[in-house]
Image: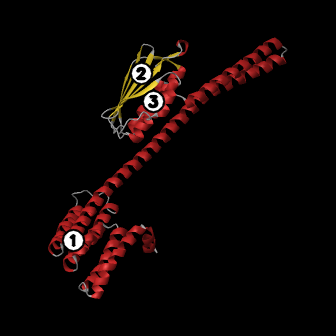
Amino acid sequence: MRLLHKFKQIHIMYYVSLLYLVFPFYYSLSGGYPFYIFWLTILFIVAYLGIVMMEHPLVVNLFWLYLCFYVVFVTFNGSPNISMFNFFLSNILVWRFGDDKLIGFRYMSFYLVFLATLYPVLADTDVATQIFLLIMDMVCLGMLYAMRQIIKQTKIEQELTAKNASINLLLAENERNRIGQDLHDTLGHVFAMMSVKSELALTLMEHGAYEKAQKEVQDLRDIAKNSMQEVREIVQAVKVHSLEEELQILGNMLELAGIALTIEKEEIAIGREQETALTMALRELGNNLIKHSQASSCRIQLSEKDGWVRVLVEDNGIGFEQVTGEELHSIRDRLIRYQGRMEIISSKQPTQIQLDIPKGDKDEHTRC
């Protein structure tokens, strides 16, 4: 049952490739190849499936060596066309031993097999067959290295996705803790005050001090009104952080993503709405940086001049292949609402994105 379960787990493409073994079977039975190649091919199937299914290093290595032996032996003693069975070896290297180094045991043995099978191809075939088999050999090598790169890139993207998910969970947990603490500090104090005030009002009413009781009830109303405003502010804070808080959160996110962040910051004064727009723009830039840039370092520079706040974000990632003017349009649209602008100063090496926004209403300035 355990063996059957392993058979079911093997990807169907491993089985499909075995269809090519019909050729050595056919020619060994029809007399085109020596008959013992029939039995060697049976062992080839056993070794091939053993590599796919088993984990024991010694057994797997022995099976691998047998596959290498089979390809070389049958190419010399059967037909040079069997050199195309190098595809079996290259596919196993990519899909079964994807973490092997290019100078490791299996790759070195593959190179030796590849070189060994070139001799019968060049010595025992006509020119047309030689050209065809040499082209197939080049295709085999090309696919090997191309698929290695694709798998490597896929793994990097999967790791990045997992890292982004963990960052999002951490940020959500921090946000929940902050909200919980804010509500506890605010509402706990409010309910305690309301309890004291209501008990005092009842006591005053029992003693006929209605004017004093009325004052306590008015205080209760004011407390309830103020607490509603505080709760609204807490809810609003869930949606938007200050620029200072956003920079701190961005620093934590980039650190988790393995990106070194440097912040060069002047003290700036900015209106609340403009600060919110700039904060959201920075958040989106940070998310794009983590997901797409492949950068290892980032620099953020904040400055203020002539009634404008400027943010320059620079990284050493892959940047933009071609700047069309449509990049990061959501950030551009967000800033335009406040007469701001976004400009890609440098598309790569380094990538530089500049955000400019007016300081806004002087009466609503906050200092960052």
Inter-mark Cα distance, 1 to 2: 67 Å
In this rendering, position of residue 344 left or right of residue 43: right
Q: Which labelled disc corresponds to residue 83?
A: none
SS for dot 3: helix
Q: Which labelled disc corresponds to residue 310?
A: 2
Amino acid under disc 1: Ala
Q: Nearer the viewer, residue 107 or 320?
A: 320
Compare marks 1 and 2 and give the one earlier in the sequence.
1
- Per the image, the residue denoted by label 3 is 282
The relative height of residue 177 versus residue 363 in the rendered view (above or below) is below
Q: Which dot, 3 or 1, sits closer to the camera?
A: 1
Q: Is residue 209 visible?
A: no
Q: Residue at x 25, y 85 (%)?
A: 32
The relative height of residue 261 versus residue 90 in the rendered view (above or below) is above
SS for dot 1: helix
Inter-mark Cα distance, 3 to 1: 61 Å
In this rendering, position of residue 235 left or right of residue 357: right
Q: Nearer the viewer, residue 207 or 107?
A: 107
Amino acid under disc 3: Leu
Label 3 crowd (10 A; few <14 / some 14-19 / many >=20): many
The relative height of residue 239 versus residue 6 in the rendered view (above or below) is above
Compare marks 3 and 1 and give the one earlier in the sequence.
1
Percent of width and height locating residue 280: 50, 30
Q: Residue at x 42, y 74 (%)?
A: 3
- Per the image, the residue denoted by label 1 is 128
Q: Which dot, 3 or 2, sits closer to the camera?
A: 2
Percent of width and height locating residue 212: 78, 12
Inter-mark Cα distance, 3 to 2: 12 Å
Q: Quadrant of residue 289?
A: top left
Tally of marks: 3
